Amino acid sequence: MVTREDVENIALLSKLFVPEEELDGLTKSMQEIIDFADAINNAPASDEGFDCINNLSNVFREDEVVSSYPSTEILKNAPEQAEDHFLVRNRE
Amino acid sequence: MGTIAKIHEMLVNKQVSCEELTKSYLSEIEKANPELNAYVCVTPEAALKTAQAVDKKIAAGEEIGSLEGVPMTLKDNMSTKGIETTCCSKILSGYKPIFDATVWETLKSQNAVLLGKTNMDEFAMGSSCENSCFGGAANPFNTNHVAGGSSGGVSSAVGGNIAAYGLGSDTGGSIRQPASFCGVVGLKPTYGAVSRYGLIAYASSLDQIGPITKSVEDASLVFDAIAGKDKRDSTSVGGGNTYATLDNDIKGMKIGIAREYLDGVRDDVKEAVLAAAEVYKSLGAEIVYFDLPILKFALPVYYIIACAEASSNLGRYDGIRYGYKTAHYTGTHDMICRTRSEGFGEEVKRRILLGTYVLSAGYYDAYYKKAQNLRGTIISAFNKAFEQCDVILAPTVPMTAFEKGHATSDPIETYLTDICTVPVNIAGLPGVSVPCGFNAKGMPIGMQLIGKSFGEAQILNAAYKYQQAAPDKFIDTKWGVKL
């Protein structure tokens, strides 16, 4: 059962605001999707596991210093910047 | 038909210069795009510059590669240096990557002519292309219908002859489904065959890049060009080499039909797929029927895993480093929440919330862990199926392209559109959608050929033989460049 409080908590974890007037609709829609997802709990039990496709293993590399992108290039996409850094927020 | 092979021949024989060809594509985009809404960004300057370089090579008597000078497009979730890449989301508005995705780096080095970036459902989440912040792309067979999604723009552009081919991405059917709706060929490669470096992530264990083309040969040519191991994507393995075996005899090939794939499929689609099976019989293939009951769990498994991965991948959009940032806020938390709430569309927010829910304490075991467990079971079931057959034949979508506005009302009903395509992503297998007929209203129907892991050569071989036997299923629309 998905409650309004669940949706509010999940929204907080997701860093999303849900306006009060959308909360009931969203709770209902989440409940419908969760009911649909619940079908998997009727699947036959199996001990089959899953790690990854193609049996990949972790890839290690030497810890070498290599050149990266210039910070001026990277900062071009920042909505706000200050003193060659990303600006998170303005002081109040 | 403006296939890659045809364009290559015309360029080599100097029937048309690359510049003339590119100009005619650009002028057709201008005419058709107001209705098709396939392109969200057109890049004429870069396209013409590449075209002139190709013409210089031809004039100097140099040999050109099969993709050289061919006008094409990329879905707007592939990073293109200096060219806006938005995933059709407000939250990435104005974002210009400072690097190229590996697939684009590869094609660019072969002088592919990029005409522009194409429309998609926001962050590739959707089956109609209508979740785009630019509005959906239209179906070139009937513009009152959707192009499908999420790679709706690429499919609309290729079906509408305003790109010779394009690259899409497929997480749960996003290449195959719109290809089926728009009457073109769409290949979702094996997980790991093509590098995902520079593809903006939706669900990293499911995402793959692949070609959307007018013919099976074209899909093979493009796939062979982009497949490969890439040290910048540690899940890439490599692959390719499908072109040489396209025309192999398929006598004795075992084509499997899982009965579950035909459940709930509209009659016209089912008839077209079964008629294709008859074509295969006439080519000497053997049709084998079997059951794959685990398939009924594929759709919920897909939505749980995809949303879980999306909720994590989309955590990076915080308004600090790129894209949209809210104008008014009171503190850091408030700034991030406002940015995300204003920047993401409704479906993206719904999937982030669902993903966060299934990963949260108390629900993780019942949903995420159980879904991962079933993923293993689905993979084993496919492995067992391939002991009985070489390729699996199935519908691509249970229906043909629906009318605009139909998909947005009910999320679950919209998710059901993906029922035939998601099993391939869950199991990491290759699948190709090939046109196999039309319904009474003239809308295209697609069939899907599914192969073993890294079995692209076999499914493309089977697809090519079908195309040769049933050329009337591959027809052109009224739009775009006529060659």
Image (tube, rainbow, N blue to C red):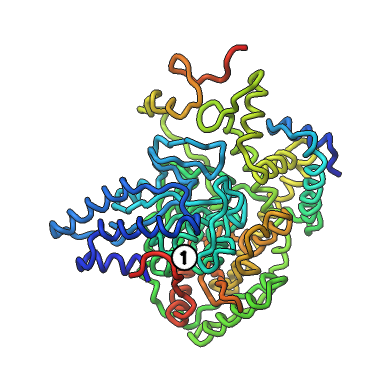
Quarter of the image for the N terminus of chain B: give it: bottom left
Judge whether residue B156 can be spotted in this image.
yes
Toward the viewer: B432 or B324?
B324
**Which quadrant would residue B263 be assigned to in this image?**
bottom right
Q: Is residue B147 left or right of residue B258?
A: left
Judge whether residue B204 can be spotted in this image.
no
Q: Secondary structure at mark 1?
A: helix
Q: Is residue A76 above or below residue B365?
A: above
Quarter of the image for the C terminus of chain B: give it: bottom left
Residue at coordinates 57% horizontally, 57% vertically from top-left? B149
Which residue in the structure is indicated by mark 1? B159
Q: Is residue B149 above or below residue B15?
A: above
Q: Is residue B283 left or right of residue B1?
A: right
Q: Is residue B198 above or below residue B270?
A: above
Neighbours of disc 1 within 10 Å: few (<14), some (14-19), many (20+): many
Toward the viewer: B43 or B334?
B43
Q: Position of residue A35 (x, y in %)?
A: 81, 52
Q: Position of residue B55 (x, y in %)?
A: 20, 56
Residue at coordinates 50% horizontally, 82% vertically from top-left? B252
Residue at coordinates 17% horizontally, 53% vertically from top-left? B56
Q: Position of residue A22 (x, y in %)?
A: 77, 39
Residue at coordinates 44% horizontally, 47% vertically from top-left? B41
Q: Position of residue A26 (x, y in %)?
A: 78, 43
Residue type at mark 1? Gly
Q: In the displayed orientation, state which residue is furthest to the bottom.
A: B282
Q: Chain of mark 1?
A: B
Q: In the displayed orientation, state which residue is furthest to the top.
A: A92
Q: Is residue A31 left or right of residue B87?
A: right
Q: How many marks?
A: 1
